[in-house]
Image (spheres, helix red, strand yellow):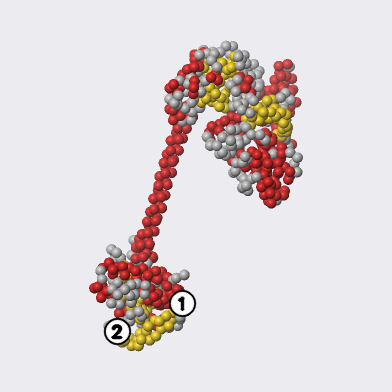
Amino acid sequence: YGFINTCLKSLVVEKYGEETWEKLRLQAGVQDSFLTFEVYKDEITMQLVDKACKILGMCHRASKMNQPGEYFFEFCKRSGYHHMLRTLGGNLYEFIENLDALHSYLSLSYQAKKGTEVLFLLVFPQEMNAPSFRVEKNEDGSMHLHYYSDRRGLCHIVPGIIGAAALDFFNIEISMEIVDQTEEEERTGKKEHIVFLVTQNPVFSYKERNEFSSSPQYLADSEKQIENQLNKEDLEKAKNTIRDRGSSVCPVKKSHWKTIRGIITLGKGKLLRGFDPVYPKSLWIDTKTFCNGLPFHMVFDKEVGQACVKQAGVSIQKIVPGLQTTGISLDHYFSILHPEVPFTISSIQKFINSQFVFQTRREMMPESWKQRPMLELRGQMIWMESLQCMLYLCSPLLRTLHELEERQMHIADIAPHDVTRDLILLNQQRLAEMELSNQLERKKEELRVLSKHLEEEKKKTEALLYAMLPQHVANQLKEGKRVEAGEFKECTILFSDVVTFTNICAQCEPIQIVLMLNSMYLRFDRLTTVHDVYKVETIGDAYMVVGGVPVPVPTHAERVANFALGMIIAAKGVQNPVSGNPIQIRVGIHTGPVLAGVVGEKMPRYCLFGDTVNIASRMESHGVPSKIHLSSSAYQCLKYKNFEMTGRGEIEVKGKGKMHTYFLIRNKTATENEIMGRP
């Protein structure tokens, strides 16, 4: 019903707008505004239709149900069923006559669960119970279409669907009117039975009319008329008739005699297009051969209102031994699954164009069958007028070898000419291919999961590698390349150590030292990320960072200075395991040129070389607890960068003689939270 609702929505919105549709939807009790794939109760949809008819000014719902039918037909075409529908028949009568067979095939193929939407013509989801059609030709060329459905009210959508199919497939316009409407008792339970009178008119343009005059159907009609004249008149009159038909029948270049020879066979003068079968005077097949050649067939007649068995194929006798007794009632051993009709000749005759599906009755089967699934048969009914009997030509309804084994049957039980053999084997091959495909999919999924885990492990490995080496250096090493040393004309190096670290180590357990250093280094490591400086290494209590290496930046001195201020603050949060007070650190900073490169192959390290490293280390060792000691070059870089600094004066530096140094006090513009990278 979602298709009907969607079409109604488009009609109302187009004319009255979205607000009117929402009002209509709420009045009808539909809570969801997106209706396309919803399944609604019949009452809700009919309320929606009635409300829409009032808004659209329609006096009756039937007048507006055509458009949902046309919409649904177009939807089926777009969904891939166009060719399947188009090949059902060569005319509208054959098309409608074969709809039930199509529904039967699709319902058996999809094995859908209750409420599942399957997109094919006129199938509405109620446990896949499709409507049924029966068509009768009238002498005047019109037809009576019998429509059976489990649901009331849907008959008005049928003209839209059939009309759209007639126009699209056969280029004819039809008119359909209801001539009878009853509660049908012919089928199991009460079903709605609607009888439509269908009249049809071809729709031709001038060009199409000319094409039609030379079409095979038109030629066949012309030849039929000629054949009648040949039976009454001589060949010369047939020649004149062909000439009178003009060039629309045969090309002008051919002579009339060639034309006649082209449509008449040599010998008895029968028209090729007017096929008339020839039957033998007697049937050249004995009873035994017939029952063996068609192992699944039954012949029954109507005696005292019952379907009494007259003969049966050998395989069906083997499965249902009761059929070996002629004259038994067929409905004692079988029930009709499709179409849902009583087991009487008269009811079966009304639906003789449908595929019939029989199922064995469990209570009548031999003991060996009690625990097996019941056997289903599918085939066609043929009424034999001369014998007043019905012939049921059928095959076991089996799809896989598993179903065959469940019923303890064998391929040999099925006739070699029966395509059921091929169907089972081909389907088994398809299932094997599907299982192989599923295995490949499972392997693919396993590989995807493994690949995902591998990628996660790779990221962890890379994160660990990038923590030890600069990223570009690490990438070069992964690629097996040799990393060349690089010269940096100006960078800023920082060293720090813990005051009285030797005394602390002498008075504490090793684990306490490890915990203290780990607590301090975790704080320092976070600050390297905050200020974007590179951690070179740690040796014992010494911590070394550099700014401007390995990526040169003009703000290297400011970054290292802010990092140093953060170190002093962070150290106050680390406890001295001996005294219980916060630890004190010394920090030294120097700016100058360095050479940087990777040394070693096993556990390679990115190291800095040059006098700048030595001076920075001297600034730390000659520093004061909880102070940041600056060299003259570092002071010059920070002099105009909003930092407060004070001079220390000249001091004697080991190996360097006298040097003028400074202390870094604070950043004039940055708050403590900004220095520490806090929110």
Which residue occupies 66% across, 18% down? Answer: 269
Q: Report the residue marked by disc 2.
A: 653
Q: Report the residue marked by disc 1.
A: 670
- In the displayed orientation, state which residue is furthest to the front: 580
Secondary element at tag 2: strand
Which residue occupies 45% across, 26% down? Answer: 372
Q: Earlier in the sequence, mark 2 or mark 1?
A: 2
Q: Is residue 457 left or right of residue 213?
A: left
Label 2 – label 1 distance at C-alpha: 32 Å
- In the displayed orientation, state which residue is furthest to the left: 506
Which residue occupies 48% across, 30% down? Answer: 399
**Picture quadrant of residue 589:** bottom left
In the picture, the disc for residue 457 is none
The quadrant of the picture occupied by the N terminus is top right
Q: Residue 375, position in %: x, y?
A: 49, 25
Which residue occupies 65% across, 27% down? Answer: 184
Name the amino acid type tagged 2: Val
Name the amino acid type tagged 1: Ala
Q: Residue 562, position in %: x, y?
A: 41, 76
- In the displayed orientation, state which residue is furthest to the bottom: 649
Secondary element at tag 1: loop
Q: Residues within 10 Å of mark 2 (few under 14, many from 20)?
A: some
Residue 333 appears in the figure: yes
Nearer to us in this view, 631 or 213 = 631
**Picture quadrant of residue 350:** top right
Q: Is 382 rendered above or below residue 592?
A: above
Q: Residue 178, position in %: x, y?
A: 72, 31
